[in-house]
């Protein structure tokens, strides 16, 4: 045992592994995430109404060749943030 009661193996640190999500994001995807997160923060700060938040989110998410399912998979988490904020 070491001096502070830990086993020798516990002093080893695991190498940091970047999140697979972070590795797979393009610059455009990061930009969309930043925009959408900022829109939600503006709503929380009282600077944007719920209806404007919805419109701004839809405008921020690119729909070039994406299906409705792909669009919704991006849009819904931000709208859920709104719902969670309103609940509490």
Image (cartoon, rainbow, N blue to C red):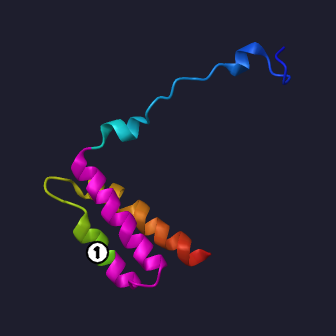
* Residue at position x 81%, y 21% in the image: 6
| 74 is higher (above) or lower (below) than 56 | above
The answer to whether residue 3 is left or right of residue 15 is: right
Q: Secondary structure at mark 1?
A: helix
Q: Does the magenta-highlighted stretch encompass residue 7?
A: no
Horizontally, residue 5 falls left or right of residue 84, namely: right
- Kindly give the residue lying farthest to the front in the view shown: 3
- Quarter the N terminus occupies: top right
Q: What residue would you read off at disc 1?
A: 56
Residue 48: in magenta span: yes
User: Horizontal and vertical percent for residue 30?
Assistant: 30, 52
What is the residue that sits farthest to the left in this orientation?
A: 64
Which residue: 48% across, 77% down? 44
Name the magenta segment's main secondary structure. helix
User: Where, by quadrant of the figure, is residue 51 drawn?
Assistant: bottom left
Q: Which residues are magenta?
A: 26-53
Nearest the camera: 33 or 82? 33
Residue 8 in the image: state x and y as whole percent.
Answer: 75, 14
In the image, 87 versus 22, the foreground residue is: 22
Give percent across and percent down for residue 80: 47, 66
Q: Position of residue 68 (x, y in %)?
A: 25, 58
């Amino acid at each position: 045992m070491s001096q502070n009661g830990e086993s020798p193996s516990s002093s080893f640190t695991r190498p940091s592994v970047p999140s697979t999500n972070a590795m797979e994001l393009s610059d455009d995807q990061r930009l969309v995430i930043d925009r959408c997160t900022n829109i939600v923060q503006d709503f929380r700060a009282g600077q944007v109404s719920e209806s404007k938040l919805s419109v701004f989110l839809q405008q921020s998410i690119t729909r070039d060749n994406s299906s409705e399912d792909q669009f919704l998979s991006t849009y819904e988490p931000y709208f859920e943030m709104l719902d969670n904020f309103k609940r509490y």
